[in-house]
Image: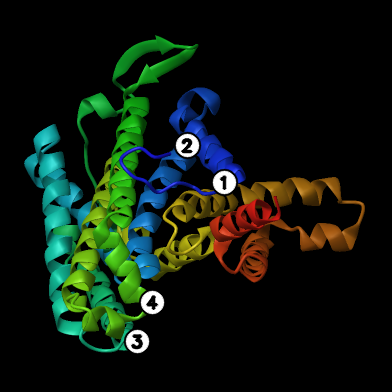
Amino acid sequence: MTILSGNRPGSLPLALLLLAVVGCLALAPFLFPGTRALDTAAKICIFILLAASYDLTLGYGGIVSFAHTMFFGLGAYGVALMLEHLGRGWLPMLAGAGLGALAAAVLALLIALFSLRVRAIFFAMITLAVASAMAVLVSQLSGLTGGEDGLNYQIPRELTPAFRVGSLFGVTVNGKILNYYLVFAGCALLFLLLLRIVSSPFGRVLEAIRENDFRAEAIGYPVLRYRAAATCISAAVAALAGALYAIWLRYVGPGTTLSMEIMIDILLMVVIGGMGTMYGAILGATLFVLAQTYLQDLMGAGAEALSAVPLAARLLDPDRWLLWLGMLFILSVYFFPTGVVGRLRAMAARSARST
């Protein structure tokens, strides 16, 4: 847990939970066979990275932004457009990811220089306006982006199910599993990079600015530069997460990368896991994606088991899964106001004081 960083989980139960999640994700193709399970594992990896990058601005920098899905979409569309127009290949794919990250960082810098001088609420409103404008622009430029229908494209053959490698532990290893490990490795490396950043002097200054920006400026820290740098790093990492998502899905569209629903999902993941902890992104994204994917099935099984009790079966109707998902998250925020990570760390601190 101290790889490349001195940032420790700070709680034994938290460390065990993190190890369990990371271990399951690392061995997902062998522990959970099936396309749906692998899709869920890949989505968890990507949203852990996306939530962690948002935590850098919100949790460490105290900056509320609604443009994070726009940066995510820039990375995804960068890969899609390069593969669509230059053909399948590793070079167009890597170039698309790099250009998407560069475009996201430049756009984030422009937004930061233009709006970070004003109060936080105005920055949030400006990012919301820019993100909405970008979503409309992508939908209207149908000749380039495919509009509302999005784009389908081909990725290198080595990352497709048609590419067979062999068999390992009774599982046929093909290009889709190689694609999963590309996503897993990319997300893991970028997450470790973020963990290293928040543990560095730069991260400490960001926390100081979040707590009291006037005091930080008074002792000589250029607040605007630090906030702009955090916004740019966060945007570039979000774009790379979008690039990995595009490589995994082999499809991009406004609904999968630019929608406001994804922005709300990211916000919930950070809040549930614990803001300003970075590890919270792992738990928050995992809980959220698992609930989003499997809650409807669980409710269907529950309704069937309680079919003799009409009221209970009606309450557990699978069509009401969004209602129950919302209630679960309201309860989790109410009982865990500092997130799961914050609560576990507080329990560990109380236990240490009492011994």
**Disc 2 and disc 3: Cα gap in Å?**
36 Å
- Residue 300 horizontal side relative to residue 135, left or right: right
* Nearer the observer, 143 or 160: 160
Left or right for 39, reference 348: left
Q: Which mark is residue 14?
A: 1
Q: Is residue 310 above or below residue 251?
A: below
What amino acid is at disc 2?
Val
Circles 4 and 2: CB atoms closer than 8 Å: no
In which quadrant is the N terminus drawn?
top left
Q: Quadrant of residue 110?
A: bottom left
Residue at screen point 28% across, 52% down: 242
The residue that disc 2 covers is 22
Q: What is the C-alpha distance between the residues marked 1 and 4?
A: 25 Å
- Residue at 66% of width from left, 58% of height from top? 350
Q: Quadrant of residue 57?
A: bottom left
Q: Mark 2 Cα within 10 Å, few/some/many (few <14, many 20+)?
A: some
Labels 1 and 3: the sequence-earlier one:
1
Please, which colouring scheme is shown? rainbow
Question: Disc 4 marks which residue?
Answer: 211
Residue under label 3, please give it: 121
